[in-house]
Image (cartoon, rainbow, N blue to C red):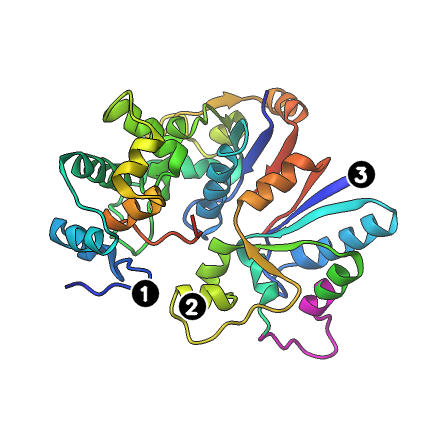
Amino acid sequence: MNFALNIQGSPYTSNSLWSALHFAQACLNEGHRIHRVFFYHDAVLVANALQAPPQDEMNLTTAWQTLGQNFELDLCLCVASCLRRGILNDSEAQRFEKTASNLAPGFNISGLGQLIEASLVSDRVISFGA
Amino acid sequence: MAPRDREGFLVSPADWTPEIAEVIAEDLGVALFTQHWAIIDLLRAYYAQYGLSPPSRVLMTLLKREHDPEFSSIALMQLFGGRARRQLAQIAGLPKPSDCD
Amino acid sequence: MTELLFILSHPPGASVYAQEAFDAALAGSAFSNIAILFVGAGCLQLIQPKLAVEAHERKDFQRGFKALADYDVHDVYGCEDSFKQFGLHNQALVIQPTLLTRVDISARLKGAQRVLCF
């Protein structure tokens, strides 16, 4: 089966990204496909390259990057959610005249259309709420 | 002149006046005539009422309903240039869109 | 046929989630035939805000509900049980959704091609 993930909760504050990570791993291990992982609301904060969680706790950013790399996943962030919360790639930093960018490698910023497209072409959308 | 960002959007949309619209339009190479103003006023009224900056397809619905039943997206481009909706929103002083449409 | 059913369950004032969820539904309307279902505390979004919202302090995004028809969104539903629970039947609402019983909701969930929860 082909899944689309719609993840919404804040990293470390909520369990949303953690649950979604394990769901994604389980799916892929069982031979299912994940068309796209869409990060919405506070979930976009997982792509903040400046986070430094305690070393004896799971690093969600690294965990998602690794999974993304291993399975060539499309890890897509909502641009509007990002701009509100200060997750910027170089071009958005330029557009909004900010002095720095902080998007972690392996994630890309795009629009809500990506969530809709993923929803329509996959067999199931799984939402991990805020 | 009210400050504008590097893309030409007002830093504070509350600064908008018709005179500022003329300046923004001129920078975009658009001269504003009666028909332009009718569309600008329509868009500003819609934003004031609903808090939404309508995407192109909704804008066309509105223009056909409230401006001219024969209105087309070609006509909008002829009035406001190739990136018509974006330029119209910019001239009308709507908030800078988060996307790049 | 509903392709995408958006379920909105966040209350309006507590966070930005309700506002962003509405943005997601509007984005959906550009691509397919969508329906919106307000459930639980999400039904509170439908209450007409009583206080004038100062510009820029907090966006009164709910007035956008009145524009849904312009976005070709005509199927707007509310959970009848939630309406009872929150006493919404006699409140001034921004828009009046079609109220659905639990059985109706279950049928809508089955009938939708995809369900997106917010």
Mark 1 belongs to chain: B
Q: Give the quarter of the figure containing the N terminus of chain A.
A: top right
Tell me the kind of residue under disc 3: Met
Residue tagged 3: A1
- Which residue is found at the position 27% from the left and 49% from the top? C53
Task: Using residue C65 as the reference point, say whether residue A113 is left or right of it.
Answer: right
Q: Where's residue C14, x and y in %? A: 44, 52
Contact between marks 2 and 1 (CB within 8 A): the answer is yes
Labels 2 and 3 touching (C-beta < 8 A): no
Please state which amino acid type lies under the numbered disc 2: Gln
Q: Please tell me whether residue A2 belongs to the stretch shown in magenta.
A: no
N-term-proximal mark, 2 vs 3: 3
Q: Label 3's element?
A: loop
Using the rendered view, name the quadrant where residue B40 is placed.
top left
Return the x and y of residue C105 as percentages of the image width and height. Answer: 60, 24
Q: CA distance from mark 1 to mark 3?
A: 46 Å
Q: Residue at 79% of width from left, 56% of height from top? A: A71
Front residue of this view, candidates A113 and C21: A113
Asked if labels 3 and 1 touch by Cβ distance under 8 angstroms, the answer is no
Q: Which residue is mark 2?
A: A94
Q: Separation of disc 2 and disc 3 at Cα?
A: 40 Å
The label nearer to you, 1 versus 3, is 1
Question: Residue at left 57%, top 21%?
Answer: C101
Q: For the magenta stretch, what is the residue range? A: A50-64
* Count of numbered tags: 3
Q: Residue furthest right?
A: A30
Q: Position of residue C56 (x, y in %)?
A: 29, 55
Residue B37 percent coordinates (x, y)? 17, 39
Q: Is residue C66 visible?
A: no
